Image (tube, rainbow, N blue to C red):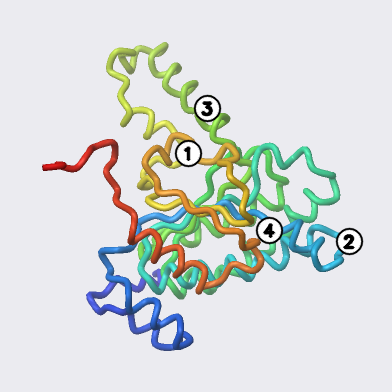
Amino acid sequence: MNSVQPQTSVWPPARAEAWEPEHREMLAGLARADLPRHIAVIMDGNGRWAKNRGLVERIRGHEAGIESVREITRTCRTLEIGTLTLYAFSKENWERPRFETTALMELLRRFSIDERGELMENGIRLLMIGDADDLPRRTRAAIDGTIKLTRDNTAMTLVLALSYGARDEMVRGVRKLAGEVAAGRLDAEAITPDSIDAALDTAGTPDPDLLIRTSGEQRISNFLLWQIAYSEILVTPVLWPDFRRGHLLEALTEYKKRERRFGRVDDLG
């Protein structure tokens, strides 16, 4: 039996009553209809955060970033955001020094275990996208265990992008479709955007409405290239370990102002 807490019709949500007054004031300017269904975040700036504080090991920045993960996940759950996807480790990150990647994998292992109670209490389902075969055995076992434990939760989905690269995802998806064509189960002429959606790691997950990148870098970094075709993009100079509820509410306030046309143009009269 899981601990799913269904969405309610109350707005602002009762959970937000414990927030600081300035955050409740920011929330008062948002309606439920103003919010995205899916937020994706490129969590950048952990290394610079550590360097700015004179810390020799970059892993200290990653450790500090865990608290941001917790607070942003809790905030999204309070706001009843359906899906939150976090870019935690890219395919290219394996090229970093061995001691850093080893420490990161251990940090992810501990996180996936330590957060099980809160995920269950809040009805949050954990998913992973990326090449799971790249992960160390202990890390993958811990993440798989949490995914299995939370699979029936429906209040919110938290997606971790690990050993993820959008081009790698597309190649794996194309190979899957090519195999179906070669086996005679799929006509090549019948392949549609929906077919490609279903072949990607994110199958069954709505495309992000809002993509946030922290640390001020103006690039996508091989993240969800297919899925963000019509996402609103917001870049903030705030480093990820400093990114908190107030910054997310600022991003949502900006998102509210965006006019999403999906390639259409309004009647200019």
Please name which of the two marks, 2 or 3, marks the residue nearer to the observer. Answer: 2
* Residue of label 2: 56
In the rendered image, the quadrant that contains the C terminus is top left
Tell me if mark 1 has few (under 14), some (14-19) or many (20+) residues whose alpha carbon lies within 10 angstroms of its own: many
Q: Nearer the viewer, residue 151 or 222?
A: 222
Of the residues under marks 2 and 4, which one precedes in the sequence?
2
Q: Nearer the viewer, residue 150 or 155?
A: 155
Please name which of the two marks, 1 or 4, marks the residue nearer to the observer. Answer: 1
In the rendered image, the quadrant that contains the N terminus is bottom left
For the residues marked 1 and 2, what is the alpha-carbon distance in whole angstroms?
A: 36 Å
Q: Position of residue 187 (x, y in %)?
A: 30, 13
Of the residues under marks 2 and 3, which one precedes in the sequence?
2
Q: What element carries label 4?
A: helix
Q: Which amino acid does label 1 sit on?
A: Asp
For the residues marked 2 and 3, what is the alpha-carbon distance in whole angstroms?
A: 37 Å
Please name which of the two marks, 1 or 2, marks the residue nearer to the observer. Answer: 2
Q: What residue type is labelled 4?
A: Arg
Of the residues under marks 1 and 2, which one precedes in the sequence?
2
Tell me if mark 2 has few (under 14), some (14-19) or many (20+) residues whose alpha carbon lies within 10 angstroms of its own: few
Q: What residue type is labelled 3?
A: Arg
For the residues marked 2 and 4, what is the alpha-carbon distance in whole angstroms?
A: 23 Å
Please name which of the two marks, 4 or 3, marks the residue nearer to the observer. Answer: 3
For the residues marked 1 and 3, what is the alpha-carbon distance in whole angstroms?
A: 9 Å
Q: What element carries label 2?
A: loop
Residue 201's label in the rendered image is 1
Q: Where is residue 176 in the image (x, y as percent from the top left)?
A: 46, 24
* Residue of label 3: 172
Tell me if mark 3 has few (under 14), some (14-19) or many (20+) residues whose alpha carbon lies within 10 angstroms of its own: some
Kindly identify the residue that appears in the image at 41 percent across and 57 percent down: 83
* Residue of label 4: 109
